[in-house]
Image: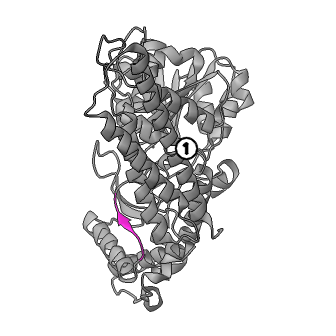
């Protein structure tokens, strides 16, 4: 990996801060100009303080962008935290005079901030329906995905499950007839799976899917109105299906009715490419692709600030989806919308390629570090691992696939043992100053370890999961060796002491590491 990766990423974050600061300045100047033109009174107790804060924040952003030179891992993490703070400050300023139900006209005092709100004549004048920041965010997000035409609509939601709920409600209320068949992968994300299984008024069926042909053959034989697909399931025993091959295969079918293929790309994070551009899809008027994604994971540069999701759908369905987002209460508020603007796509591919590299290194290192008596008992059930049965699908159909590494065991391992493994791994990392976190989610800039699928509908068994981040390769290798040592300590009756793996090198070893 290039040694200037962290510098490049921070340069991108600095550019985003500068752009958003200009956005705030333009909004503020527009507000002041609107008040002057209409003769409305601005609040003398608020204006000076706001303008002083805008100026001070401009200086802080300049200082952030002026920091140059070689950036180490710890420095990078420190400055990413500064970025998170500055973005929240900018978001507060960008919405400083927002009202959720703005008064589009006023006689003396303004109850509107963004000039795009002023004089609006719409059906519903609420910010749970639309607002200028979200409009810009949706346009930008669609463009960052590589879609520049008018044939696609993009809608941001309050979460990834919010995006799923919007699509589910839209299909049931606007597109499906009583008794229609809704199919879904048997290993779809457990929350989505639970929702689908409980739908009323339609038939539902879970389908075992291990390859693209499974989906194509089922649609050909059963004729479902909807098929919900997740390329890689979030469980201990994972499989990977090639989305591009599924879309091409379905596109070649002669469909008797409109068929909706709903894909959740939260874990692939763009690694599947531009599915809406696939020629077979464009040529089949009966096949409709709907893409949803949680933006809390990989789309926030690992900074985990805003709970958000997205729906991509053909423009012909835009109005129906727009209405369902409002009716479901799955709208992304103005403050969070502005924070999402900070997480642009300029560094996304670069970051995901680094995570891809680190994930592959982690899998290989962990496998090598396990003692012989554990190699058959501990499986790395991610297609990223060269030993996984779908590794070739990963190499053939995905540019990257995130950094999630689930572990499965050839015997029953209780929750207490999993938590002891985590505690030991954290302790070993702490001894030498290696960054590692214990949490249940994934997609962060630094590596995390945790037990997943422990709540909700309890449709999956708890399993150990590592989420590899942007760490220096040397740190990734150390984390893998420490996890191997912890697994050995708690799973092998007569634990072998891995002396070489426990060497304490001190925090300085990773401050300047690549």
* Vertical position of residue 510 compared to residue 82: above or below: below
Answer left or right for 342 relative to 347: left
Q: Position of residue 2 (x, y in %)?
A: 66, 68
* Vertical position of residue 198 compared to residue 25: above or below: above
Q: Position of residue 351 (x, y in %)?
A: 57, 56
Q: Position of residue 333 (x, y in %)?
A: 36, 31
Residue 408 visible, this orientation = no
Q: Main secondary structure of the magenta part?
A: loop
Q: Nearer the viewer, residue 489 or 307?
A: 307
- Residue lying at 37% horizontally and 12% vertically, measured from the top left: 124
Q: Disc 1 designates what residue? A: 231
Q: Is residue 394 magenta?
A: no
Answer left or right for 322 relative to 352: left
Which quarter of the figure has residue 474?
Answer: bottom right
Which quarter of the figure has residue 254?
Answer: top right
Answer left or right for 111 relative to 154: left
- Residue lying at 58% horizontally and 63% vertically, measured from the top left: 7
Answer left or right for 281 relative to 508: right
Q: Position of residue 466 (x, y in %)?
A: 43, 63
Q: Which quarter of the rendered picture does the C terminus lie within?
A: bottom right
Kind of element beneath mark 1: loop
- Residue lying at 50% horizontally and 36% vertically, measured from the top left: 23
Which quarter of the figure has residue 383?
Answer: bottom right
Instruction: Give the extent of the magenta segment.
Output: 434-439
């Amino acid at each position: 990996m290039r040694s200037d990766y962290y510098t490049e990423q921070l340069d991108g974050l600095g550019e985003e801060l500068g752009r958003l600061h200009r956005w705030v300045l333009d909004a503020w100047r527009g507000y002041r100009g609107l008040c002057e033109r209409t003769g409305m009174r601005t609040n003398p107790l608020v204006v000076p303080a706001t303008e002083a804060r805008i100026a001070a924040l401009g200086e802080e952003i300049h200082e952030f962008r002026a920091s140059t030179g070689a950036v180490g891992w710890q420095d990078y993490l420190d400055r990413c935290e500064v970025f998170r703070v500055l973005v929240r400050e900018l978001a507060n300023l960008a919405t400083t005079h927002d009202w959720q139900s703005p008064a589009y006209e006023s006689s003396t005092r303004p109850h509107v901030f963004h000039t795009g709100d002023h004089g609006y004549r719409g059906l519903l004048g609420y910010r749970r329906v639309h607002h200028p920041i979200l409009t810009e965010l949706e346009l930008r997000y669609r463009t960052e995905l590589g879609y520049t035409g008018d044939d696609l609509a993009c809608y941001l939601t309050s979460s990834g499950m919010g995006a799923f709920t919007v699509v589910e409600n839209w299909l049931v209320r606007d597109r499906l007839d009583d008794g229609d068949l809704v199919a879904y992968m048997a290993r779809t994300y457990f929350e989505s799976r639970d929702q689908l299984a409980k739908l009323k008024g339609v038939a539902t069926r879970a389908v075992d899917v291990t390859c693209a042909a499974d989906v194509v053959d089922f649609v050909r034989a059963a004729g479902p109105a909807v098929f919900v697909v997740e390329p890689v399931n979030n469980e201990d025993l994972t499989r990977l299906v090639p989305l591009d091959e599924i879309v091409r295969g379905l596109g070649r079918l002669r469909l008797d009715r409109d068929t909706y293929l709903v894909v959740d790309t939260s874990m692939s994070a763009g690694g599947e490419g531009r599915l809406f551009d696939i020629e077979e899809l464009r040529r089949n008027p009966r096949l409709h692709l709907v893409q949803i994604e949680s933006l809390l994971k990989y789309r926030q540069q690992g900074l985990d600030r805003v709970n958000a999701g997205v729906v991509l759908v053909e423009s012909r369905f835009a109005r129906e989806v727009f209405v369902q987002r409002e009716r479901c209460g799955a709208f992304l508020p103005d403050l969070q919308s502005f924070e999402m603007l900070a997480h642009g796509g300029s560094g996304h591919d670069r970051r995901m390629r680094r995570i891809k590299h680190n994930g592959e290194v982690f899998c290989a290192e962990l496998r090598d570090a396990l003692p012989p008596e554990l190699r058959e008992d501990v499986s790395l059930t991610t297609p990223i691992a060269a030993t996984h049965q779908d590794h070739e699908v990963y190499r053939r159909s995905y540019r990257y696939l995130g950094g999630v590494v689930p572990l499965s065991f050839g015997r029953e391992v209780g929750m207490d043992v999993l938590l002891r493994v985590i505690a030991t791994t954290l302790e070993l990392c702490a001894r030498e100053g290696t960054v590692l976190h214990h949490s249940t989610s994934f997609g962060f800039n630094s590596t995390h370890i945790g037990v997943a699928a422990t709540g909700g509908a309890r449709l999956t068994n708890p399993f150990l999961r590592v989420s590899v981040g942007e760490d220096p390769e040397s740190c990734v290798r150390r984390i893998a060796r420490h996890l191997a040592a912890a697994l050995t300590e708690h799973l092998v009756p007569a634990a072998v002491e891995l002396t070489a793996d426990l060497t304490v090198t001190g925090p300085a070893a990773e401050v300047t590491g690549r």
